[in-house]
């Protein structure tokens, strides 16, 4: 088994949680609680990787991940 490390962005709004993996196009999910969204995105990433491996597609790897919150006044 291979281990992979990916960035995951989790957002919360009035409807619940939304998560996505920026390195894997189309890999996203939603949930009602933080605990649920963490499990859901793990499952989504696993399925996405399994599909890529089945299709012999490359698995993107990043060496450095940076996240920032930015306030913009308009």
Image: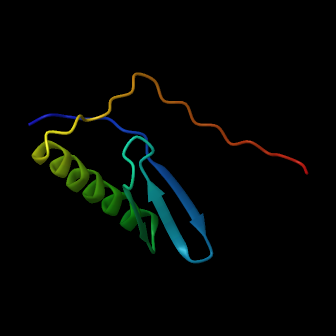
- In the image, 30: left or right of 49? right
Q: How is the image coloured?
A: rainbow
Q: Residue at x 46, y 24 (%)?
A: 64
Vertical comparison of 33 with 64: above or below:
below
Using the rendered view, name the quadrant where residue 56 is placed.
top left
Q: Residue at x 53, y 73 (%)?
A: 16
Task: Return the x and y of residue 33 as percentages of the image width and height.
Answer: 45, 70
Q: Residue furthest top?
A: 63
- In the image, 15: left or right of 46? right
- In the image, 71: left or right of 54? right
* Depth order, front residue of 66/58: 58
Q: Residue furthest right?
A: 74
Q: Residue at x 20, y 45 (%)?
A: 52
All told, the count of numbered labels is 0
Task: Return the x and y of residue 12 as percentages of the image width and height.
Answer: 58, 64
Q: Residue at x 42, y 71 (%)?
A: 31
Task: Return the x and y of residue 29 as percentages of the image width and height.
Answer: 39, 64
Task: Return the x and y of residue 59 as percentages of the image width and height.
Answer: 25, 35
* Depth order, front residue of 23/11: 23
Vertical comparison of 13 with 49: above or below:
below
* Depth order, front residue of 32/44: 44
Q: Quadrant of the N terminus?
A: top left
């Amino acid at each position: 088994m291979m281990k992979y490390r990916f960035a995951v962005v989790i957002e919360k709004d009035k409807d619940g949680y939304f998560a996505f993996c920026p390195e894997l196009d189309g890999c996203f999910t939603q949930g009602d609680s933080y605990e649920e969204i963490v499990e859901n995105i793990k499952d989504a990433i696993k399925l996405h990787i399994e599909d890529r491996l089945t299709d012999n597609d490359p698995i993107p790897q990043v060496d450095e991940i940076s996240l920032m919150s930015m306030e913009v006044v308009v």
